Amino acid sequence: MPNSGFLGASPDPAVWWRGAAIYQVYLRSFADGNGDGYGDLAGLRTRLPYLADLGVNAIWLNPWYPSPMADGGYDVADYRDIEPVFGTLAEAEKLIEEAHAVGIRIIIDVVPNHGSDQNAWFRAAVAGDRTYRERFWFRPGDGDGPPNGWQSIFGGPAWTQVPDGEWYLHLFAPEQPDFNWTNRAVHEEFLDVLRFWFDRGVDGIRIDSAAVLVKDFDSVEEAYTDLDGVHDVYREWRRLSDTYEHRILIGEVWLPDQERFAKYLRPDELHTAFNFDFLSSAWEPRALRESIDLTLATHVPLGAPATWVLSNHDVARPVTRYGRAVTSWDNADRRDGMPSDLVLGRRRARAAALLAMALPGSVYVYQGEELGLWEVEDIPEEFLDDPMWRRSDGAVRGRDGCRVPIPWSGDEQPFGYSTGRPWLPQPAGWKDLTVEVQQTDPGSMLCLYRTALALRAELLGDGALTWLPSSEGVLAFERDSGLVCVVNLSPDPVRLPPHDTVLLASGPLDGDLLPTDTAVWLR
């Protein structure tokens, strides 16, 4: 893969995204500035120096729009304003300005598949206005039941009946009606939403559930994932984004077929898309090597940079995941309650971080990943908020365990996150993982991330990778800068290859030996 202009800590602004380190902020749980227990823009703005010191190039924010919060903000009532719990539009504009002043770009979520049942269009549709009803998927039932047997991704039927007898489609929660992308008004609405935020200085758009916009009701199967018509939407969006300077489109595309995945990365569609294959891979050398090779083979022919992701707001945190007997990830089986060795998980998570940051392309860091937080699996039921929990009648605990508010300082809840009670309770054991504790400990996860991100800015990012000979169970490769990354996933220590300098290791080395579940960067 060509370097494409990545120049260490000062990438070419036109292609800044190709090698960027992007930090995901789940705003509700990042920092609370007004003491109501919910994170907000005021809290985030006070923490911009932390993010600048961490060494990230951009922040991706989960939805910040007005929302009834039936799905953590992914049920959007108004795409051109800010949820009052989070702040105001003026504060959002100030955040963009302040972030740019410290060298951080802003990426926001846009949710095109569905809105909120409190959206003005949907309220008009339910009231019987056919013009607005045609902007969603309203259908007569099949006898006394729904139009078909499609099931919601969150569990239960994907159809809900309105008082006049018709049914509307919602692939997620009933409070999230799906838009009808065969209707031109829907296209125009979202193009205007993109203009609204690009005009305010937003640098990128992350597209939620990007592959499910188009539906085929004539199919016997549940036909809504990755239908060809979705690409017309993103070609249209790309034409718009290209009229602005240095703006990007990022897709959330969960697809097992890499050939189909690659279509989203064609030069006239999205700039990048999340690499969930790598995130889902087991902590095993063959699985990781195959995922890396497959990812690069998919991206290189298109000239698109790969993305490397270990966690986000929907999956179990790496420290917990890598400490389990089964270390892969599967959305269909979250393995809630499976025992986890957190000491082992933390050691592997540290090594995985160096592996991900050394690979060519961009890297995403989900808030708290840099602190080594574990998945909180014992949240009392009365606090659980995820619709997965509600829609499954308690069979699936859902995603709240990776959304618990960040511990900043102090010895007890709320750990500097708020002056009030956090909306989700924080574990008492997080007192040892606060930013305050870790920032002065050179062996902490936080210091590992800060050091790695600084080195990455200088030596890594976009570019090429060359695999090096290595013993069984070991991954070793060299990057354009001459940096060599070695990860030992075998059960025994292995000897380091010839080198001049150890730049960084995820754990202590034993002389010239690299212990198991440890990664190292060499020159």
Image (cartoon, helix red, strand yellow):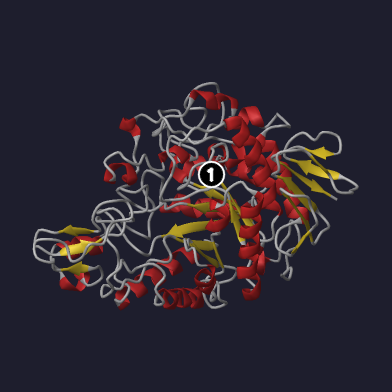
Residue 232, given in percent of the width and then of the height, sits at: 43, 78
Q: Residue at x 74, y 38 (%)?
A: 492
Q: Nearer the viewer, residue 15 or 33?
A: 15
Residue 182, given in percent of the width and then of the height, sits at: 31, 76
Quadrant for the N terminus in the image = bottom right
Q: Secondary structure at mark 1?
A: helix
Q: Is residue 291 visible?
A: yes
Query: What residue does disc 1 label?
Result: 45
Q: Nearer the viewer, residue 293 or 471?
A: 471
Q: Residue at x 47, y 52 (%)?
A: 92
Side of 322 relative to 76 (left or right): right
Residue 282, given in percent of the width and then of the height, sits at: 57, 48
Side of 300 relative to 107 (left or right): right
Side of 312 relative to 425 (left or right): right
Decide: is 435 above or below 362: above
Count every numbered label the image shows and give the total.
Answer: 1
Q: Nearer the viewer, residue 200 or 470?
A: 470
Side of 416 relative to 6 (left or right): left
Q: Is residue 200 visible?
A: no
Residue 342, given in percent of the width and then of the height, sits at: 57, 31
Q: Find residue 19 and report its image quarter.
A: bottom right
Q: Residue at x 78, y 42 (%)?
A: 504
Q: Residues within 10 Å of mark 1 (few under 14, many from 20)?
A: some
Residue flagged by tag 1: what amino acid is it?
Answer: Arg
Decide: is 291 above or below 25: below
